[in-house]
Image (cartoon, rainbow, N blue to C red):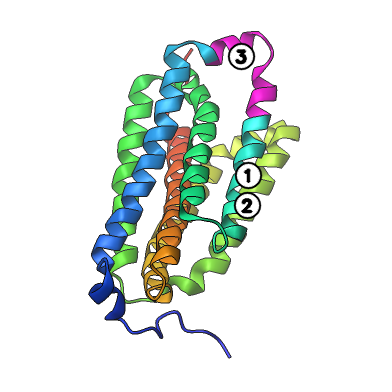
Amino acid sequence: MSFDPYEFDRGYASNQGDTLGQYTAKTFLWMLLGLLVTFGVALGCWVSNLTLYLIYSGMFQIVHLGAMIATLVLAFTMGRRIERMQVGTAIAMFVAFSALFGLSMSTILLAYDVSSLVLSFGATGLYFGALAAYGFLTKRDLSNIRTILFSGTIFLIVFGLLSMFIPGLNAFDHVICLVGIAIFLGWTAYDTQKIRAFYHYYSASPEMLAKASIFSALQLYLDFINLFLYLLRFLGNRRR
């Protein structure tokens, strides 16, 4: 028998704590905090020339690989153990994830000109906001598009790995960027709607509800970052 995440009393959470609107706002504020940490670390590495130092010293690949492995481990651990960890631990892992990702993101500040970064960030905010609003307000159940989105994400990962060894695949970069933009716009709507499901599913447990908010913020954070990166590749001009 399947479990309906909406079977809890819908009035419980609003009577005992945050309303759905307040809970959703807190989730997006956590996402915003993660983005501020990431871009703050990236900007700090760029201004201090730490990224250039690591590149010229030959250490960047090692540091970059270590940061990427650490972020994957943190994301996997948080996703699998969110129900058992403390709220403070979930917050610490989310902030650590955001900071480590910022180290990797610092390279884009060297690779693209400022106007491209600003344009892509503005476009990301606009598109992300529109699809998040759609996901929150629509009455349509978006759970049926999860398989398509997951398959598309796997395709992007496989294509990215293959393009590292088959240079000719780079000719399809603009097409792949459009696919990536579409996929992460879909994830944005899906993950925003899932906030509502988590709210009703965990309404009887304020602590679990808080952890679910952080986990949702992580998903939305990844949607925003990936959407930004694909838009930057599609719209941006690299530094000469």
Q: Is residue 57 magenta?
A: yes
- At 42% from the left and 52% from the top, the residue drawn is 217
Mark 2 vs mark 3: in front: 2
Between the residue at mark 2 and the residue at mark 1, the CA separation in whole angstroms equals: 6 Å
Task: Determine if the magenta segment contains residue 190.
Answer: no
Q: Is 226 located above or below residue 168 in the figure?
A: below
User: In the rendered picture of this protein, how many numbered marks are placed on residues?
Assistant: 3
Residue topped by disc 2: 76
Mark with earlier residue (1, 3)? 3
* Above-or-below relation of 168 to 18: above
Q: Residue 74 appears at what percent x and percent y? A: 60, 45
Residue at 69% over, 37% down:
163
Do labels 1 and 3 touch, CB within 8 Å? no
Q: Secondary structure at mark 1?
A: helix
Type of amino acid at the residue the image marks with label 3: Leu
Q: Position of residue 119 (x, y in %)?
A: 32, 32
Instruction: Using the image, determine if residue 74 lies above or below residue 122.
Output: below
Amino acid type, callout 2: Phe
Q: Which residues are magenta?
A: 51-65
Q: Confirm or deny contact between disc 2 and disc 1 (CB under 8 A).
A: yes
Instruction: Count residues near mark 2 (Cα–Cα under 10 Å), then give few for <14, some for 14-19, many for 20+.
Output: few
- Residue behind mark 1: 72
Q: Position of residue 199 (x, y in %)?
A: 37, 70
The amino acid type found where label 1 is placed reads Leu
Which residue is depicted at the point 41% across and 33% down?
Answer: 37
**Residue designated by label 3:** 54
The quarter of the image holding the N terminus is bottom right
Mark linked to residue 139? none
For mark 3, give the secondary structure.
Answer: helix
